[in-house]
Amino acid sequence: MWRCLTGLLLASSLTAQIWSGDALAQSHADNAADLVEAAATITASDYVYPELAEAGAAHIRQRLAEGGYDGLAGDVLADALTTDLARATGDSHIRVIHDPERVVFYRARAAREPDDDVREQLEAARQANLAASRDAGFGFVSIARLPGQVGYVRIDEFDSNLLTDGQTYLGEALRLIDGVDSLVLDLRYCVGGNLDVVSYVLGYLFTGDAVEIGRQIERWQGLDEPVLTPERLPGPRFGDVPVYVLTSGMTFSGGEHMAYHLQSLGRSTAVIGERTYGGGIGWDPVVLNDHFYIRIPRSLVINAQSRTLFAEGAGVMPDVVVEAGRALDQAWLRALDDRLSEADPADEREALTWTRRIAAARAAPDLPIVGMIETARPGNYGPYQFTRRGADLMLSFNGRPAYRLEPLGDDVWFDDRSLQRQFRFIDAENGTAQVIMSRLHDDGEVERDAIRLDG
């Protein structure tokens, strides 16, 4: 099983039954030497990379011998150990944590037969966590259609509850974008999550057969087994459409896995955005003593094609490097351009070209539009009244309040209200100004009307 990178919260009443004020105060008198040795032993035996495991263990033992932890206790001691282990391994996941309450939780969760009170508390915590997952859409923040038959899916977390309680929800939600020609997968805000969920979601981006994404390696228990996508999934699959993956410098862990495996397996058409954070190893909590535990990365998944994983701290490098805030517009434009290159019927090409103007303007805010206001011909054109307001062109319909039109370049102005329309001013043969109004209908047909300047 791939490791979960997030955990359940424990109700505070669970620890209240076990830890008295004296016991909590005693945690500050823990023997640093015993704690360091416990952390070093676990690091050496369990950490995923043997060479770094030895380096990390040796480093904190040396720091102990040098007096680096003298006089430290509690959170301060935990932070010092975390800093030293991270420096030696280059891994942002590994952490020593001082939290007696969580130690109780992890021990209770691991117990083969916890008592009734503990079981009740664990179930209450699970139900609270599940309710929070449902409220957050199991990590799926947005599923929508962009103009031009481009699907959009934003994932902020690969929530472990998806596998037990959210599969039907996800399958139904994905029906909203069934039949799209392209798919944009937005991982710019993804903080990680359960890596079993990553392989599950990856299944939607392949056809029905199981696909080997990589191999899971756990040195501490001699595990080396394939990681496969599921063969059966509720809802539609998108195995035959181009996939554009968005990343940012904050895309972390499970989000990085998704981007990296799609890129390495050649399933993504392009990864667009910023280099990711660089923390892709799954971790487990291991109790060190009554007051401390260590988050130890001990599960590694290497890609089936590259036979490796992106380096800790280095992250995933996009195919198209662009500021994260502009990545969606760039991906939308790229998807439309790729579709245009294959479009055959004239009406399909016309509809895509209509939409592409909008995408191009949003993808390139520095588009040279400064002089566009000079090409406009203000005045009344039937029910449309155009006026200038500085460098802006304003439109009023039948005397209603005016609003600003968006310049798209190439002398085209865009109306993005209840009806989407594009306007271009031209001079007729007799010198009379006209405005060409274009409107895209749901069936893909572009309707055009030429309206003369009144008078």
Image (cartoon, rainbow, N blue to C red):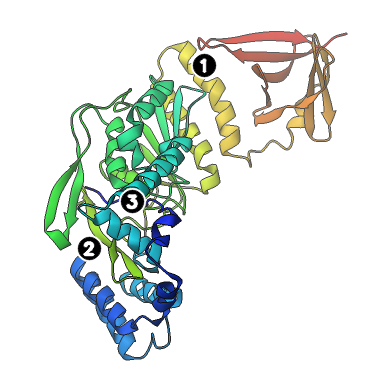
Q: Amino acid at mark 1?
A: Glu
Dot placed on the residue nearer the N-terminal end, 3 or 1: 3
Q: Amino acid at mark 3?
A: Asp
Helix, strand or loop for disc 3: helix
Between 14 and 81, which is closer to the camera in this rendering? 14
Residue under the point 39% across and 82% down: 29
Is 150 situated above or below 381?
below
Place of residue 188 in the rendered image (x, y in percent of width and height, measured from the top left): 46, 46
Q: Nearer the viewer, mark 3 or mark 2?
A: 3
Place of residue 256 in the rendered image (x, y in percent of width and height, measured from the top left): 36, 49
Question: Is disc 1 in contact with disc 2, using a CB cutoff of under 8 Å?
Answer: no
Is 215 situated above or below 407?
below
Q: Which residue is mark 3?
A: 117
Q: In which quadrant of the rendered image does the C terminus lie? A: top right
Residue under the point 28% across and 54% down: 109
Residue under the point 32% across and 86% down: 64
Residue 202 lies in quadrant? top left
